[in-house]
Image (cartoon, rainbow, N blue to C red):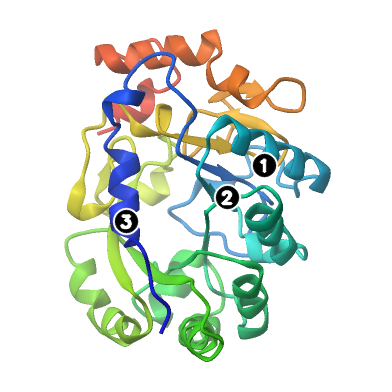
Amino acid sequence: MAQVEHSITTRIDAVTAIPPTHRMPVPPAPRSVKIELTGRCNFACAFCARSHRLREQKDMDRTLYERLLKEMREAGVEEIGLFYLGESFLVPWLPEAIHYARHEAGYPYVFLTTNGSIATPERVEACMRAGLSSLKFSLNYADAEQFSEIARVKPRFFKGIIENLKAAHAVRERGGYDCGLYASYIMYDGAQAARMRATVEEARPYVDEIYALPLYTQADLVTEEEQARGWRYTAGNRGRYDALRDPLPCWAVFTEGHISWDGKLSACCFDHDGRFRMGDLKTEPFMQAWRSEKFQDLRRAHLSGDVRDTVCARCVSYG
């Protein structure tokens, strides 16, 4: 069985904690960056504002991707996530992207989150062979009925996600790949934990860790239709359910970079409409954008605990 150096929750908590070294307007390079190979997704989940199509959703230029990875690694970035708001398994050159990150750019840890629908054994093995360090399945549905209702996809595809997760475990064990396997799910309301019990127990033997996430407001892009479901939203981005952080200061502003498919550096995990853009990495270096005056002003507001006059106001004050 593969040896997993660190649990995924340990890594998540390290990023969301905002260490003293990064709790400042001009922090060093973030330890972790998520880069969007594609803005496209084959689901239209009710909890995700991506389905509103508030910005273009295309694939990243491969030359831009390779330049950015080299540049960020030289700046000190240690972990690279090959996803942001889209489904990266839609990208034909995903295994090549992983290989480049590990073996050309030199990242010690390359991670990926997927909805699991097209993470077939063949594609997963190609990714693991390329050097993928961590693969997480977003199991955000308790059963086929909830899957169809939330993901807006035919219920028969739910079984395929579970089978792909199990197959990923078999691929790893058979090939001896050093890749962590994980799963997460969203706590939509007080009943979701009980509703998820059977699916969680079915998945547990095939993953190294499974954990819950709160339901985010997606930077306050929740619609009236979604609110009418009676779901329990949490303001800001507070990390995972069992280790919630304070909404302010938001860790995403200090410890993790987020790059959209078109090369824009964002201050938010949920920049579905482009309002959180802090720089254009097609025209300026990563560290210049990371330490831009615009980004510094936003961090100062977060450190003061008052973001009322910033792009973060609606997200943090929600509810």
Describe residue 64's horizontal placement relative to residue 311 as left or right. right
Question: Looking at the picture, which amino acid does disc 2 mark?
Answer: Tyr
Decide: is 189 above or below 27.
below
Q: Quadrant of the N terminus?
A: bottom left
Residue neighbourhood size for the residue with mark 2, other residues' Cα within 10 Å, grouped as few (<14), some (14–19), many (≥20) = many
Decide: is 81 above or below 98.
above
Question: Looking at the picture, which amino acid does disc 1 mark?
Answer: Leu
The numbered mark, 2 or 1, whose residue comes first in the sequence reads: 1
Tag shown at residue 69: 1
Observer-nearest of 101 and 207: 101
The numbered mark, 3 or 1, whose residue comes first in the sequence reads: 1
Residue at (66, 60) in percent of width and height: 98
Residue, disc 3: 229
Residue neighbourhood size for the residue with mark 3, other residues' Cα within 10 Å, grouped as few (<14), some (14–19), many (≥20) = few
Residue, disc 2: 107
**Whole-percent x, y for residue 14 in the image:** 30, 44
Give the alpha-carbon distance from disc 2 to disc 1, as whole Å. 9 Å
Question: Looking at the picture, which amino acid does disc 3 mark?
Answer: Arg
Observer-nearest of 119 and 192: 119
Please name which of the two marks, 3 or 2, marks the residue nearer to the observer: 2
Do labels 3 and 2 touch, CB within 8 Å? no
Describe residue 230's horizontal placement relative to residue 141 as left or right. left
Element type where label 1 sits in the image: helix
Observer-nearest of 6 and 200: 6
Element type where label 2 sits in the image: loop
